[in-house]
Image (tube, rainbow, N blue to C red):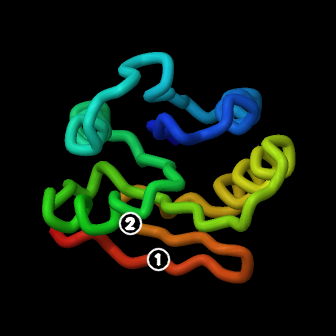
């Protein structure tokens, strides 16, 4: 799966995803400091699923009318060590194959998924 890791994603999580075979572009190294709209535009142009801890992307994704080739996964974990975050994110993303075309919110206890508007 092709992912776009937002700037707020820990390095250890990006590396863990890459080690598990995910194709990950990291905003922090590829396009640091860009606006949220530019991050979404990159997800669209590269057909990537955005992974983020930033709540603003929920509303932005729906207003932008992201195509079905993209997706957004919002993680809402309470503070944990970077290694624990990496472990959980890799495990969760590896557990499913239907992230594309979806807006997902993942917290401590559940995964909520809604299809992006077509």
Taking 40 as reference, is 62 above or below it?
Answer: below
Q: Which mark is residue 87?
A: none
Using the rendered image of the protein, determine whether residue 83 is visible from the camera's viewpoint.
yes
**In the shown orientation, is residue 117 left or right of residue 11?**
left
- Residue 101 lies, in percent from the top left, at 34, 61
**In the shown orientation, is residue 26 left or right of residue 60?**
right
- Residue 20 lies, in percent from the top left, at 74, 35
- Residue 59 lies, in percent from the top left, at 26, 68
Using the rendered image of the protein, determine whether residue 3 is visible from the camera's viewpoint.
no
Q: Are marks 1 and 2 in contact (CB under 8 Å)?
A: yes
Tell me the crowding category of disc 1: few under 14, some 14 to 19, or many 20 or more residues within 10 angstroms, Cα based.
Answer: some
Residue at 73%, 48% in the rendered image: 90
Tell me the crowding category of disc 2: few under 14, some 14 to 19, or many 20 or more residues within 10 angstroms, Cα based.
Answer: many
Residue at 65%, 55% in the rendered image: 93
Taking 21 as reference, is 63 above or below it?
Answer: below
Taking 1 as reference, is 84 above or below it?
Answer: below
Q: Quadrant of residue 80?
A: bottom right
- Lower position in the chain sequence, tag 1 or tag 2: 2
Determine which residue is flagged by label 1.
113
Determine which residue is flagged by label 2.
102
Judge by depth and name the residue closer to the eye, 102 or 108. 108
Q: Secondary structure at mark 2?
A: strand
Q: Secondary structure at mark 1?
A: strand
- Residue 43 lies, in percent from the top left, at 31, 39
Taking 101 as reference, is 37 above or below it?
Answer: above
């Amino acid at each position: 799966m092709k992912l776009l890791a937002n700037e707020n994603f820990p390095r250890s999580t990006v590396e863990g995803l890459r080690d598990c075979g995910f194709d990950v572009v990291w905003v922090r190294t590829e396009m640091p400091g860009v606006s949220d709209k530019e991050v979404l535009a990159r997800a669209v142009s590269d057909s990537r699923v955005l992974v983020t801890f930033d709540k603003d992307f929920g509303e932005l994704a729906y207003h932008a009318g992201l195509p079905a080739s993209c997706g957004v996964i919002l993680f809402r974990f309470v503070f944990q060590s970077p290694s624990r975050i990496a472990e959980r994110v890799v495990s969760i993303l590896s557990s499913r194959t239907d992230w594309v075309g979806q807006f997902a919110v993942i917290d401590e206890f559940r995964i909520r998924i809604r299809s992006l508007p077509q």
